[in-house]
Amino acid sequence: MEKKIITNFVHPDIEDYAEKHTSPENEVLTKLNRWTHLRMTRPRMLSGAYQGKLLEMISYMMKPSKILEIGAYVGYSAVCLAKGLENDGILHTIEADEELEDIILKTINDANLDNKIKLHIGEALNVLPSIDEEFDLVFIDADKINYINYYEQVLPKVRTGGIIILDNILWSGKVVYTQPKLDKETATLIQLNDLIQNDPRVENLLLPIRDGLMICRKI
Ligand SMILES: C[S@@+](CC[C@H](N)C(=O)[O-])C[C@H]1O[C@@H](n2cnc3c(N)ncnc32)[C@H](O)[C@@H]1O
């Protein structure tokens, strides 16, 4: 198929209407969203209000005790996911960029979640073995090149019935409108989507929201 980059899988008018009929972010997240767009490079990495609300809703519906996130950036999605935690629940988030540490800790503090979110600074594949938990909910949102490694390392740590959500799984449509020479990220995501689709360990749903979310339920 021809080369295409798609920024909206849903028609922009429909997306706009859906956003206007979705509860807004709270004050902490609005400020963080604005600040990130003013001060940070690559603000598009932030989940944002609509996807953030979806993560929050899933978390509220599941009432998880243990959540894992790979890729914190400024802490936006961590705050959304932590909202649905059980009273004594904990969210572990892993971020490789140590320059983001103070920003993430400030976000956690602003959201009054110091006792619920534990930040691990380091490469996710090195940090993961040191987190000895069984997870109810996992959000994978870091370097795409390692997505298969993350999926395989994380799945044994998820309880039966637990959920793994993977972001950017459509990669601006590049997994569909493939190019003659695939870049490494696109090739990895195509391989992972096929692996998940044929994986008897999970039931899965690919949602064309934002850059594509794959939701896997461990059987
Ligand atoms: C898309 S952003 C995360 C956005 C955040 N989850 C949100 O929705 O607001 C991806 C983050 O993953 C981090 N990252 C990249 N490679 C990583 C690795 N190997 N281990 C841990 N974090 C990594 C990046 O530094 C970046 O902050």
Image: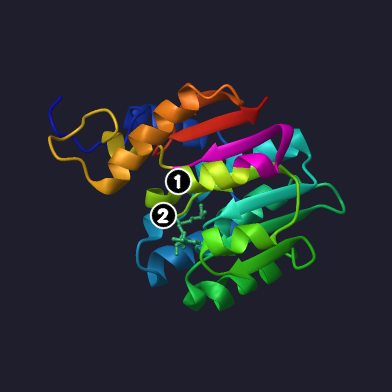
Residue 8 position (above or below residue 150): above
Quadrant assignment for the C terminus: top right
Q: Residue 143 carries which label?
A: 2
Residue type indicated by callout 2: Asp
- Percent across and percent down for residue 168 are 41, 42
> Closest to the observer: 17 or 117?
117
Q: Are marks 1 and 2 in contact (CB under 8 Å)?
A: yes
- Percent across and percent down for residue 17 are 44, 30
Q: Residue at x 40, y 63 (%)?
A: 37
Residue type indicated by callout 1: Tyr
Q: Which residue is drawn at 53% across and 42% down?
A: 151
State the extent of the magenta-drawn residues as a range: 155-167
Mark 2 C-beta to ligand 1 under 8 Å: yes
Q: Decide if residue 56 is in sight here.
A: no
Q: Distance between the residues labelled 1 and 2?
A: 7 Å
Q: Residue 130 lies in magenta, yes or no?
A: no
Neighbour tally class for label 1: few under 14, some 14-19, many 20 plus, Cα within 10 Å? many
> Closest to the observer: 152 or 50?
152
Q: In this view, does 133 lie to the left or right of 43?
A: right
